[in-house]
Amino acid sequence: MPRVRILILTSSTGAGHDARAQAFAEWCFELYRHNVDVRIEQMLEKSSGFFSAGVRFYNWIQKKSPWIHKAFYLFVELLSLLNRRSVSFGRVYYEAVLREYQPHLVFSVHDCLNRGYFQLARKILGADRVRCATYCGEFSGGFGYSANWVEPSADLYISRTATARDYAVKLGMAPERTRVRGHLMQPRQYIGFMSAETRAAYLEHELELRSDLFTVFLATGGNGANNHIDLLTALLPHADRVQAVVICGKNREAYNQVLHWRAEHPQFNCFLDGYSEEVHLLMQVSDAIVTRGGTTSCAKALHFGCPIVFNALGGVMPQEELTVKFFNRGAGVALINNAGDFSQIIAGWLGDPASYQAFRDNFLKLRYEEDPTLVITELVDLAQEASRTEYRPGPFPSKPRKA
């Protein structure tokens, strides 16, 4: 096959967008080796000081005051009007990247990097010399699903679920150019399933925990948004029956706080880590995970069969509401607004194990099998279509710069 170039547009608003960009790049190398060249650009941060400040503000909201995001979300929706036909903020950098890299496929994994970005790519490179595609990670539609996800001129729109795909069609995406293709996770996460014996050994030898206790996974995204101390304190009365796995992301302050808490409570079994590359293993040895409605964490939990307790302390961000809504479809959802809610849920499951088993069974009904290579093949094939036409670039700046 001819060598193709794929430009991925992403941003570090949360960790999920970058995780999917990385997963796509790893799959391309796994399947095609050096025949597919992938370039990942954090386009919002690198192209515009205005957008870079917006990313930092978003991540601050996620960590400190999720309720503020309802207003911030409405502000971001204005981009659907601002970038209707081309890119406004950050155009100089993006245009320079296009001319320098000459991608055959522009692949967006972020809601704010579709509208305008696809039109400008076709203008700069030629409509027949580049293809444009979107992967949307939302679980469902409604308030919180950004209109910026849907650029009707996209050659391909890929959705995680059928409900999110149907909402994209409602917003103007042509049905024949949509696909439902699952979670887009790293290759190693599709082969990392443990047997019961392996799970017990991992708990005891790798995490130094007990295999006979109910294990709660207190998770966080890469930014480290968490309520670990409040939740650990709620678990403390059940120390003879419950243990915890805790990760803190890149939040060093949270790590230090939990480290101190653990030292003060030696009667409670607790494994602690900062940013972990083994989340897919930690989920498999846990009986439940406490997390916000981040799509990447929730998708992994569903894939590995780890029931979710949704952390709503401080409020629920609009896109997180989409995730909660999906998991509430006939299966019920465990959502906590404070540490008291959490204590009540855990006490209920410990007192009546059948209620936990029923909750887990309903959760697993939402799970589905997927072929993770299918979406990779479809996108690479799309890039190959464009690669068959020779491209001769015009002059461009020697080095991309911020607007």
Image (tube, rainbow, N blue to C red):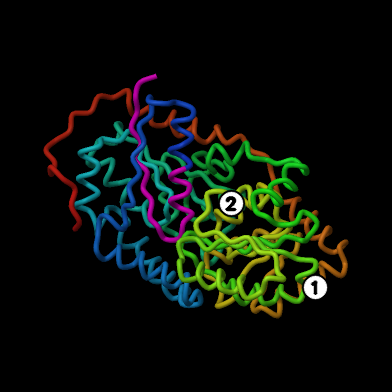
Report x, y in % for residue 173.
48, 48
Q: Which residue is mark 2?
A: 279
Real-space Cα distance between discs 2 and 1? Answer: 25 Å
Quarter where residue 291 is shown: bottom right
The residue under the point 66% across, 78% down is 339
**Which quarter of the image is occupied by the N terminus?**
top left
Q: Position of residue 43 (x, y in %)?
A: 31, 52
Q: Residue at x 25, y 55 (%)?
A: 47
Query: Dot 2: few (<14), some (14–19), or many (≥20) neighbours within 10 Å?
Result: some
Circle on res. 347: 1
Amino acid beneath label 2? Val
Residue type at numbered disc 1: Ala
Magenta part of the chain:
1-22
Q: Secondary structure at mark 1?
A: helix
Any mark on residue 214, and which? none
Q: Quadrant of residue 60?
A: bottom left
* Element assignment for label 2: helix
34 is higher (above) or lower (below) than 146: above
Quadrant in the picture for the C terminus: bottom left
Which is more toward the observer, 22 or 280?
A: 280
Above/below status of 80 relative to 183: below
Q: Residue furthest top?
A: 1
221 lies above or below 202: below
Where residue 304 appears, as percent x and y from the top left, is 67, 47
Please report the residue visible at 42 percent of the width from the left and 31 percent of the height from the top.
382
Q: Is residue 347 left or right of residue 376?
A: right
